[in-house]
Image (cartoon, rainbow, N blue to C red):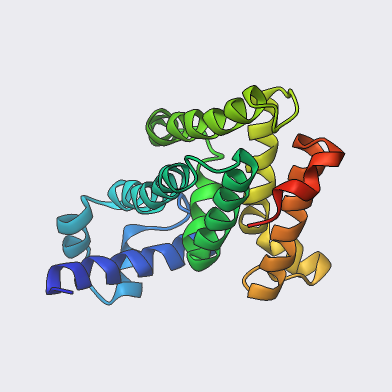
Amino acid sequence: MNNTLKTKEKIFKAALSEFNIKGYSGTSIREIATAANMNVSTISYYFQGKHGLLKYAFISFFEPYINIIEDSLLKFERQPVLACLKYVINQLMNYQYQNFELSRFVWREVSIDSQIVRETMTTYFRKERYLLQSILEKGMKSQELKKVHVGVIITQLKGIMTMPFLNSIYTSEVWNVYYQEQYYLEKYKDHIIHWIDNTLVETENVSLTGNV
């Protein structure tokens, strides 16, 4: 990694830590500079201010996120739809777990209406919707999946998949469940697969699909 990338990553890591503690709006660029042990002008040079850091966070998170879905569709192009869907879920959950702090921050920020969030929805969420919708519609057409309201299912699925990261304080403080730990993540993924089987698959077909 060259010096430019090292500097950018150091700034971003410091910013992400501050954002997770104080929130994006509650964090000043000077606090980020202090945490990164750099001056404000250096952050402005690399990110053009705090807004640039937010945009960088979204891009850093959503580019690999969308790539996971696209790669999964290619990998499972000629395989059962349910196997593809379960693989997508598994890969996305692993990705979020491996980038827990970033996932937590991004999902929290996209729940707040702003211009950059609207741009993110146009760029990434619409693409995500298209990809997930194509999986579900293919499964319904081949009769591998039940006839369902695609919009409702995708919305519910996203809610389930983001919960451990968006509500990590609630789960740890109230239930003593720590999704930062691999054990709890694996258990939670099992629950998502169970939900998929019971929501999208006829009972007699569940045993034929297997888990990924």
Q: Position of residue 208 (x, y in %)?
A: 75, 47
Q: Residue at x 21, y 50 (%)?
A: 48
Quadrant of the snapshot with the N terminus? bottom left
Q: Give above or below for 4 relative to 118.
A: below
Q: Give above or below for 65 relative to 4.
A: above
Q: Residue at x 69, y 33 (%)?
A: 144
Quadrant of the snapshot with the C terminus? bottom right
Q: Give above or below for 177 relative to 199.
A: below
Label tally: 0
Q: Of residues 187 and 144, which is closer to you in this image?
A: 144
Does residue 103 appear to the left or right of 161 in the view shown? left
Q: Position of residue 198 (x, y in %)?
A: 82, 42
Q: Give above or below for 34 relative to 150.
A: below
Quarter of the image holding residue 206? top right
Q: Of residues 47 and 34, which is closer to you in this image?
A: 47
Quarter of the image holding residue 132? top right
Q: Evaluate whether residue 30 shows in this view.
A: yes
Q: Residue at x 39, y 47 (%)?
A: 67
Q: Position of residue 152 (x, y in %)?
A: 69, 27
